[in-house]
Image (cartoon, rainbow, N blue to C red):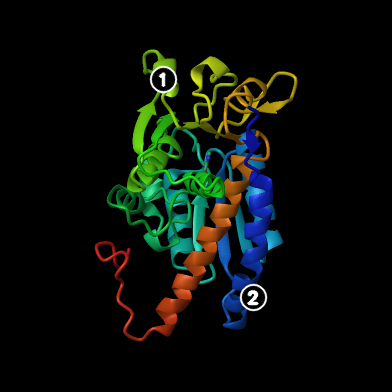
Amino acid sequence: MTAQIIDGKALSKQLREGFKARVGALVAQGVTPGLAVILVGDNPASRVYVGNKVKACEECGVRSFHIALPGDTLESEVLATIARLNADPAVHGILIQLPLPPHIDGRKVLEAISVHKDVDGFHLYNVGGLVVGNTIFPPCTPYGVQLLLDTTGTDVAGKNVVVVGASNIVGKPMALMLLQREATVTICHAKTRDLAQHTILADILIVAAGKPGLIVPQMVKQGAIVIDVGINRLADGRIVGDVDFDGVKEKASWITPVPGGVGPMTVTMLIENTLRSAERALRMRQTDDYQDWEAPVLKGH
Ligand code: GUN
């Protein structure tokens, strides 16, 4: 069997087409959706990611505020920048590109972002929301993976899902989202013994480990759906995922390519969350008796 390709580029394009009408409706009501992207330092990979996010904003009619701070910026200055953006009604989403320089406490910075503008979904409120199945903003990469899985027509309920990688950005939220959909979820990580013993049982295998070639065909069940979240640059300049694509595609029923799979979806879901935030802001403005029902504990934050 040769797997069918899950085309993230095509799905992204289709979703971004659909954004046009939503942006048009917002603009007609006097709201231009706005996303602030903060980059501290000059990590080359982060610069590329931020560049892609700003470009996607332009394509979709979202105003972007690109804030580039030097690598030696004080934590207090980053916090002051966030406070200013929290208070700015033209900004509906605030994203701080990770990783941050080591002298800055990442958790403190993420907690400073208003939950109403946390379009990356990394604030504790949104993380906690995932646990109980009710986030305002689902984190972008797992959100994109979920939509990619949906295109295969598979109901994940009762399926064995194995997530390889336990990061706060991908692995953990991915596991929680699929648990919410009643999958049987296993999370594997760097300390997992005999990874293959777990992966071979997966009906759906999601790999976000950052290790090129980690998953080889012997580790994959016949007919599995394989989602490769890895983006690795090899010494020869090629970009590859964590999965041996050529080998595994002969065993899987569906597989995402790298590039062109999960990557474009992450940026697209960021725009989705930004539009949702702008729509919420408009609703808040329009609804006289609006109650802050989605974030009662953190009202005023
Ligand atoms: N660094 C790597 N992935 C991400 C992401 O999805 N969001 C942010 N803010 N930083 C990242």
Q: Is residue 23 left or right of residue 105?
A: right
Is residue 105 something that shows in the picture? no
Identify the image quadrant of the N terminus. top right
Is residue 193 something that shows in the picture? yes
Q: Is residue 36 above or below residue 189?
A: below
Q: Amino acid type of disc 2?
A: Gly
Q: Amino acid type of disc 1?
A: Ala
Identify the image quadrant of the C terminus. bottom left
Q: Is residue 176 left or right of residue 87?
A: left
**Label 1, ligand 1: CB separation under 8 Å:** no
Q: Residue at x 64, y 51 (%)?
A: 11
Rendered location of residue 196, percent (x, y):
44, 16
Where disc 2 sits, the SS reads helix
Residue furthest right as drawn: 236
Rendered location of residue 206, percent (x, y):
48, 33
Q: Residue at x 49, y 47 (%)?
A: 146
Residue furthest top as drawn: 194
Rendered location of residue 259, percent (x, y):
68, 36
Name the residue that disc number 2 marks: 24
The residue lying toward the viewer, choosing from 149 and 271, is 149
Name the residue that disc number 1 marks: 190
Q: Is residue 132 above or below residue 223?
A: below
Q: Is residue 276 left or right of residue 300?
A: right
